[in-house]
Amino acid sequence: MQLDQISVRQIKGVSAPKEQELHAFGVRSVADLLDYFPFRYEDYRIRELADAKDGEKVTVLGIVRGVPVLQRYGRSKSRLTCKVEVGQWLVTAVWFNRHFLQDQLTVNREVMLTGKWEQRRLQMTVSESEFPDSARSAKSGTLQPVYSVSGSMTQAWIRKTIRQALAQYGTMIEELLPHELVERHDLMARRDAVQRIHLPDDASEGQAARRRLVYEELFLFQLKLQAYRALNRKRTDGIAHRIESETIREFAATLPFELTDGQKKVVNEILTDMRRPSCMNRLLQGDVGSGKTVVAAIALYGAVKAGHQGALMVPTEILAEQHMRSLQRLFADMGVEVALLTGSLTERKRRDALAGLQMGIIDIAVGTHALIQEDVFFRSLGLVVVDEQHRFGVNQRSILRRKGMNPDVLTMTATPIPRTMAITAFGDMDVSTIRERPHGRKPIKTYWVKHGMMERVLAFIRKEVTKGRQAYIICPLIEESEKLDVQNAIDLYVQTQQSFPDLRIGLLHGRMTAAEKDGAMGAFGSNETQVLVATTVVEVGVDVPNATLIIIMDAERFGLSQLHQLRGRVGRGEHQSHCILVADPKSETGRERMKVMTETDDGFEVSRRDLEIRGPGDFFGTKQSGLPEFRLADMVADYELLETAREDAAELTEREDFWSDASYARVRGVLQKDSYFQGEQLD
Ligand code: ADP
Ligand code: MG
């Protein structure tokens, strides 16, 4: 019998109603309960009062030296005080609502006190106390686990129940990790680790137990990702693109610039994947302005020249139109047909585009998410390039497969991700990274000013425009009230016109029609308008190299990665660029963000600091992050274990014997429980 097949009802003291409560926590079997780890410990170890800081919570051993004095307030409230000798001090111990202790506090009796020590008043506000001579004494001298509980399930009850479960079933806990890994990393055996994490005898044991279980958690998580990767690589039902290196070289020669070494390297990685008969699942990351778009264009070109079609999927229509234009420019003399497919096409244009894709007249479709769904059929879709904001999940993959397509997939992130995030959220992918920006780019100078300095900011705009450059002014967009924001943008637009009556000012916001947006972007792109007042619709991908100044209003309302994205709209040409953050942040984190922005313009550093300030949970925003919730592991603090676990998992899943050898049956069993590895993903 295995522990995951034994119901919690078998544990002494678990009644039917208690069983129901445990179910609400996802705890059904004994195994579940034993894996219900504490999230911290309360320290009841006895200390010397002399070592305690003023205001600190401590547990001490003392001797009752006075007669307790009880004051009652109403029916249930009371205050009990008593002089207790602790070390060299005569301390006034204070209990609230513990009137029943009055009779037990007899002179010369030993007592353990846990509470807040106020050195100046020689007073201790007692939260818990015990008498060592009493049979009920349990906590003192120990570390007590603290579990997440709610409802009528109390801390004391779950502690008792887990202790009971350990007593009944502790010896049945089996090792789960492959023996070689336990040895290699000198890990505590699972049986001991589970025991110790619930009942640590001392802190260092608790640490070793935690380390073992954190490793296990990270390893099993990485195992799924790496197994998925390994199996994907083995598949042969993808498209083996036949791409000649010469074809790519010829195309690269038509570009107005030479590719950076970083770009060349990732192009090679991508082409190597595309030539394989398996399905590419690769992440391309690089800082804003590092030139990812042209890399994507080369890959798309390769797919087309190999006789297939490509799709470029982006988050917004503005971006779709911009990419459409730049691809058309790049492919102008190449005989590559590019078409736009967005929600706002006229019915006729849409019909034409769909027919063109189905017949193979159109080589590359650029559009929003709808591109790969519903009634869209390709003659032979070979490569899908997607923007980060739509992570291409298992669902989309199966949509394509149902249509009989197994295209290669390249995902691009506009935000560089710290490695710890990348291998967690995108761990099932291969990663290509562009580190440098194109030659000759100067770092963007960033300043943080208060609202009172707008006069000087306006003078700055004037200076840049006089030099022939252009500027963005960004105002925030709050989800809840797009209407207000649009008004805000319009107000700012009017003010800007008044400040610069001789200049042409553009306006861009989310409520404009696709044609209006397109017009506004077009006018700014060709320098017909010198200043563009915009909401965050310009955030990703907009590319106007002549723009050298970006003013971000109320900058405290943006997150760090968004600020960095916005800043990336400038610094895209050879001129020195500037970013001005206008903000009066009230919060500490707001000020912290402004500081980070002024200190670095390296996207990897920005996201590292972002992760530090926000913590992993918030990093990608909620739900769609694809980040798992670890029980024990902390992606940031346990970073080294995460790396190790990933390497181990990758090495193991690449080995043939992992998939057959009996000694890995237990870990393989973990994979089989995962839906990823059931049904159509594994066929
Ligand atoms: P990203 O998508 O990574 O933010 P883009 O692909 O939009 O960056 O490139 C930013 C700008 O740099 C574009 O104007 C692009 O034409 C230009 N660019 C790309 N690669 C190079 C290069 N190797 N040398 C010079 N300019 C480049
Ligand atoms: Mg391929």
Image (cartoon, rainbow, N blue to C red):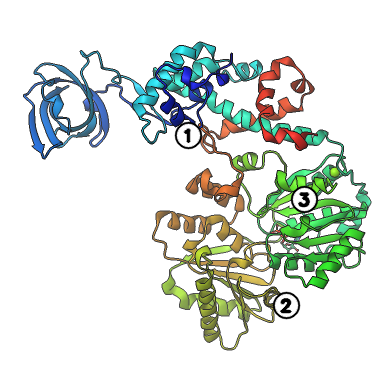
The residue indicated by pointer 1 is: 24
Q: From the viewer's perspective, is residue 640 above or below residue 134?
A: below
* Label 1 SS: helix
Q: Nearer the viewer, residue 158 or 123?
A: 158
Q: Which mark is residue 334?
A: none
For marks 3 and 2, give the one nearer the viewer.
Answer: 2
**CB under 8 Å between discs 3 and 1:** no
**Quadrant holding the N terminus:** top right
The answer to whether the residue bearing label 3 lies less than 8 angstroms from the nearest atom of ligand 1 is no
Q: Nearer the viewer, residue 638 or 594?
A: 638
For marks 3 and 1, give the one nearer the viewer.
Answer: 1
Residue 147 placement, left or right of 373:
left
Q: As shown in the figure, which amino acid type bears the numbered disc 1? A: Ala
The structure residue drawn at horizontal position 86% and vertical position 57%, both measured from the top left corner, is: 252
Mark found first going from the N terminus, 2 or 1: 1
For marks 2 and 1, give the one nearer the viewer.
Answer: 1
**CB under 8 Å between discs 3 and 2:** no
Mark found first going from the N terminus, 3 or 1: 1
Ligand 2 placement by image quarter: top right
The residue indicated by pointer 3 is: 261
**Is residue 468 visible to the viewer in this orientation of the structure?**
yes
Residue 477 placement, left or right of 423:
left
The residue indicated by pointer 2 is: 526
Residue closest to the far bottom: 502
**Is residue 200 visible to the viewer in this orientation of the structure?**
no
Q: Position of residue 314 (x, y in %)?
A: 71, 59
Residue 600: name its quadrant: bottom right
Mark found first going from the N terminus, 3 or 2: 3
* Label 2 SS: loop
Q: Mark 2 to mark 1: distance in Å?
A: 60 Å
